[in-house]
Image: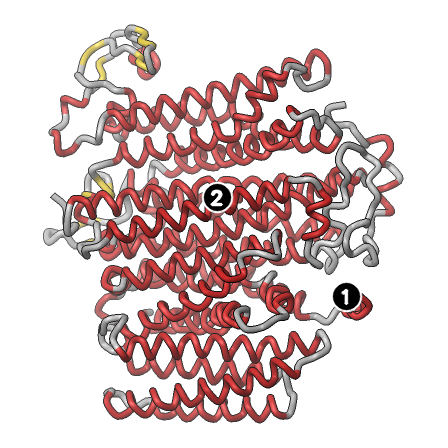
Amino acid sequence: MTGVAVALLLAGLTAYLLFGGADFGAGIWHLFIRDRRLIEHAMGPVWEANHVWLIFVMVLAWTVFPPVFAGIASAYWVPLSIAALGIVARGSALAFRKVVPDRYAGTFAIASLITPFCLGAVAGGVALGRRGWLSPPAIYAGVLTTGLCVYLAAVYLTWDAHREGDAERFRTLAMRTGYAVGALALIGAVTFGRTGGAPHSPLIALSAIAGVASLVLLWRRSYLAVRVTAALAAATVLWGAAAGAHLGLGAASAPDAVLTVVLIALAVGGVVLVPSLIWLYVLFQRDDKERAAFRGSQA
Amino acid sequence: MSLASSATDFLAARTQMALTLGFHIVLAAIGIGLPALTLLAEWRGHRTGDPVYRELARRWARATGVLFAVGAVSGTVLSFEMGTLWPHFMAKFGQVFGAAFAMEGIAFFIEAIFIGIYLYGWDRLSPRAHLLSGLPIVVGGIASAFFVVTVNSWMNQPRGFRLDVHGNVTDVRPLAAMFNPATPPEAVHLILASFMVCGFSVASVYAVGMLRGRRDAYHRRAFAIPFTFAAVTAPIQVIVGDWATRFVAARQPVKFAAMEGIEHTRNGVPFKAGFLEIPNMLSVMLKFDPHARLRGLDSWPREQEPPKNVPHYAFDLMAGIGTALVLLGVWALLAWWRRRDLPRSAWFLRAASLAGVGAAIAMEAGWTTTEVGRQPWIVYGVMRTGDAVNPGSGLTAGLYAVVAVYAVLAAVTVTVLRRIARAPEAGAATSGPDVPSDAAWPEGGTGAPEGGGPEGGVPERGDGAGASGSGAERGEVLR
């Protein structure tokens, strides 16, 4: 039972990195890109659903591993509080911008930068044996997390830009971020691979392969396929870190009666959730020729 | 007394929780009601083909978008605070009430998915599919409110676990915790309160507009729909409130004594509210016996009593405003009965324009009553609030940061909402490509051009069928 709960937690974290993380990354690109409309257009319908993965992870953690959740939350209350305020600023600013498009851009972008850094630093600190969130390894984890977000966003947005006509700019950005974040991840893999205990080289290798494949796919302009490989490259970094972490989850697990109720609730909810989520993504990724033609006529 | 590093930090933690929860509760209330109002307007728009309803639906959808987002993120803050402020509470009891939060998470997920589909799907879905895509938001909103409240009711009536000799939690039964005795009255009371806050708040925006002379069909309907919704709820809430009060009197007599300001145990307790004092009345109200004996605060040890003034004044404030809101509804009902119109008096509109703020204050006061009335316990009779708090130092600094961010957030939210409610010329310049023909409604007339918004090139779909019957039904409300 505990194994199932751990798998669900990791799945939730992965989804949050791949979807919610990309939204933070898109917010960071907001700082550098003039075509902000593309970014907000891509995020608009989906960011709230993507955000819920974080709630999912927290709720599952405090229900199934209450002492672990409480220990992390109380020890890292400072970065977590900053992240919470960052989430408030990011989400509100984005919603406000839909009504008042010429304002709140700075708040949106900076909150998008601070939040994943803080969450990544907490994750890194926890995974490396409760190091302080401002210790060098935790800061590295925060920067790497932010980098992964930026990279995922660039890759995902390349396809959105392609649908709107011109993918070249985002393609270049995605490739450059790919080199930079790949190098950053490699430094960590080598460093922590030497000092850390558990060898998780298969995941590191998988991440490296997926990262290289992503660069090739970007070079070949396969903008949909690269979304999958880039997501794999990012997810394997998270899994590698999780594989090396010792959280003592087994001893802290809630009784089976609790797990059973939660799993049944998730199974029943999943019947509605999964198709709805797929519909949401398909609906707004579907190429609407009428709209594209209309945009073309406006441009 | 408490685990906190200092008394100031403990107070800061409690203040931060109260502030962030008090902020979220208003947004959550509107987030529960506003999608339903929006769908109602959209549905009437389809049925009648009347552009007034469609414009209302569009405006309210935009407001829903803003309020849902702010509500979602302010709710996330609460999830963080559960752990960062009250880790000992979570470590011990997270397993007991966590399942309810898992269910709330699912309901919220459904809300978040469909809010995206609904808000951005105007021109990607057929009118019928678009209308239907809004329904899960309403159902999800009410469901998540229910699940969240079960946790608070559990804190008042903890069930579904045992403590062994070492004080460890054993024999956890999550469903028994969720469906504790306090759940029915608390959940119904809060959901109805949400309807009232939402209805009166939205109505009060248009009451202000009508006071400024804009008495066109748009304003009248925009006022009438939410006002009716809230005014119908108000008298039901009185009955539910009575039920909730009797429940507290039976199950948490010390909270009841604090709420009613009963200091000494005695026979024939008077009813006290403000300066008003009616001899023996409280005994009559509770036990239907003028000489019934009620327990006063003096019958509990000091360290088990809540602060006595705050729950009493908060409870009176809530009940007083609630009564006034019922009377406001009666006023409108009488006018409707006599003349099929809103009351003509400007005093009615003045009162109605305050009703939104009033309902929100009543909700906050009710929340204060139940939360402060539960003190000094975080889990009634089981764990003290002081034993739940984060022992880390610096919580006070955290409070200052939160206060600063929330002050700005509140100010900007109001500014943005006013912008949505403002004259359509401004709206037309700012509406995004996702809401075609948004804000195409000129002030003060029913002959709005259709599809005249910034995306005039996109044809509006499927309104032809409803348009034929529009003449007869147009203006049916409050004409």
- Residue bearing mark 1: A291
Position of A184 relative to B68 (above/below):
below
User: Above or below — where is B170 with respect to B10?
Assistant: below
Q: Chain of mark 1?
A: A
Q: Is residue B93 visible?
A: no
What amino acid does circle 1 point to?
Answer: Arg
Locate residue A71: give its quadrant.
Answer: bottom left
Q: Badge 2 is on which residue?
A: B411
Percent coordinates x, y for residue B12 in the rendering: 25, 45
Identity, as a three-letter code, of the amino acid under mark 2: Ala
Determine which quarter of the picture holds residue B199: top right
Question: What whole-number distance in Å separates the C-alpha atoms at marks 1 and 2?
Answer: 36 Å
Name the residue: 68% across, 57% down.
B432
Count of picture labels: 2
| Mark 1 Cα-neighbour bin, 10 Å: few <14, some 14–19, many ≥20 | some
Q: Are marks 1 and 2 on the same chain?
A: no
Q: Is residue A177 left or right of residue A82?
A: right
Q: Is B201 on the left or on the right of B291, as rendered?
A: right
Residue at (21, 50) in percent of width and height: B389
Observer-nearest of A4 and A47: A47
Residue B36, given in percent of the width and then of the height, sits at: 61, 41
Point out residue B19 in the picture as x, y percentages from the top left corner: 35, 42
Which of the image's four quarters has the N terminus of chain A?
Answer: bottom left
Q: Identify whether A54 is placed above or below B296.
A: below
Q: Give the SS element for disc 2.
A: helix
Q: Secondary structure at mark 1?
A: helix
Q: Horizontal and vertical percent for residue A30?
A: 55, 69
